[in-house]
Image (cartoon, grey):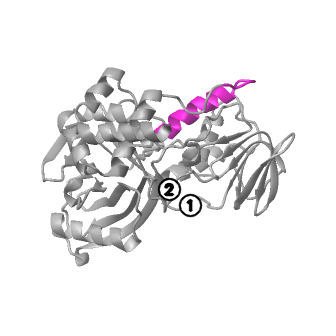
Amino acid sequence: MRMNVPSSKTYRYIFAGGGMSALSLVYFLSQSKRAKEPMLIIDLSSKSENDKTWCYWSDRPEEFDDLAQKSWKNLWFHGPHGKSIALDIAPFQYHKIRSIDWYTYIKKQLSQFPNIEFLQAEVLQIIPEEKDTKVQSSMGDFYATDKVFDSFTAYPCEINNPKHIKQHFLGWEIESHFPIFKSDAVHLFDFRVAQGKECEFMYILPTSSKKALFEYTFFSAHVREASFYRDKIKSYLQAFYGLGEEDYQIKEEEKGIIPMCLDQRARQRISEKIIRIGTSGGFVKASTGYSFLRTQRINQALAKELEKDHPQGLILPQHIFKTWLDKVFLQVLLEQSKAGSEVFEALFQKNKGSKMLRFLDEKTSFWEDLSLMASVPTLPFMRAVYHLIISSK
């Protein structure tokens, strides 16, 4: 992969944005019949920092398992009233990948292909033209003869819109001065921190007896100032581990806002010249905010389809009933007629952890979905369904 020295103005494929989704699609294309096609990746970041943490679960080997910093076979759920549940997730494992490890590996693999080039520049605009598609950047204009893969366009989820649910969080990876963490399990949800009807929790990934990532997280519409999340983490470390600020070092900090609202725009087809991918294309699972493994699977299927002379079909798999369930769940979180913590508590108390993971991965049957829905508080979900029906008229 050539860096910052484009050899041409014209490529078969241009990637407007070079984040995880774009790089993984290029990676899968490099393993396909399109491996030798000229490709250009344009992104302002050199992807040389550990800017994200990606987690996923699977019950079978996946493409990037070897890059996981740590994997777990056990999860914990802590309810808002202090009840803790050890989740049976067999045969699944839960994996954590540091973005810098993934970027380094991908760039090394792509460096074997001189036809794949990277331009460190800002994407300014994507302009369809009669023949080719123009991508304007801060380093000039480039043209795609076949497709532009767009992860640059903003997803239609507004940060300050009180009707748009977001997953917003700030996390610290800390190193304690003495061994205190049990690293055999992930604390997926700790709702003991929940103060009201907003869905707020601590998410903990312990990687050793001294190191762990603590992320204070909301599934809600209202984003806070960074100091709010930091104060919550400090209080949590003191309350649950007895750690004062002098007892640990903050090794890294990460923060993010992930859209959880559903995109109502027209479905994308693989035959189109401009294809939105990643967060821009709706690859994030709306009801959970997870995207890593989902993105790999979508991109693997997309790369196989692009091998054909006349690729067809939709970019995203269509699960009408499961999409509707996501809408209902997000509406419940938005209305806050029932605390989000209590909704999750009902789900995890009454269902096996492995079943919950299959449900979140959209692998459950219709009847399993119905049984899961029967385990949640009925009234807030009926109210959410009613409001969705009224708003759709």
Q: Residue furthest right?
A: 130
Relative to residue 261, is residue 95 drawn left or right? left
Circle on res. 100: 2
Q: Secondary structure at mark 2?
A: helix
Residue at image coords 25%, 76%: 245
Q: Which mark is residue 115?
A: none
User: Which residue is pictured at 44% across the width and 39% down the height?
Assistant: 390
Q: Position of residue 276 (x, y in %)?
A: 63, 43
Question: Mark 2 or mark 1: which comes first in sequence?
Answer: 1
Q: Looking at the rendering, which quadrant does residue 217 occupy?
A: bottom left
User: Looking at this view, is 260 or 23 the one in front?
Assistant: 260
Label the magenta part by its dominant secondary structure.
helix
Q: Amino acid at mark 2?
A: Ile
262 on left or right of 14: left
Res. 38 visible in picture: yes
Q: Is residue 265 left or right of residue 121?
A: left
Mark 2–mark 1 contact, CB under 8 Å? yes
Q: Camera-side residue: 194 or 197? A: 197
Residue range (magenta): 294-312
- Binning the other alpha carbons within 10 Å of mark 1 as few (below 14), some (14 to 19) or many (20 upward) gives few
Q: Which residue, given by chain and number where applicable, does mark 1 sit on?
A: 48
162 up-or-down from 288: above or below: below
Q: CA distance from mark 2 to mark 1?
A: 6 Å
| Residue 57 in sight | no
Quick one: label 2, few (<14), some, or many (20+) residues within 10 Å? some
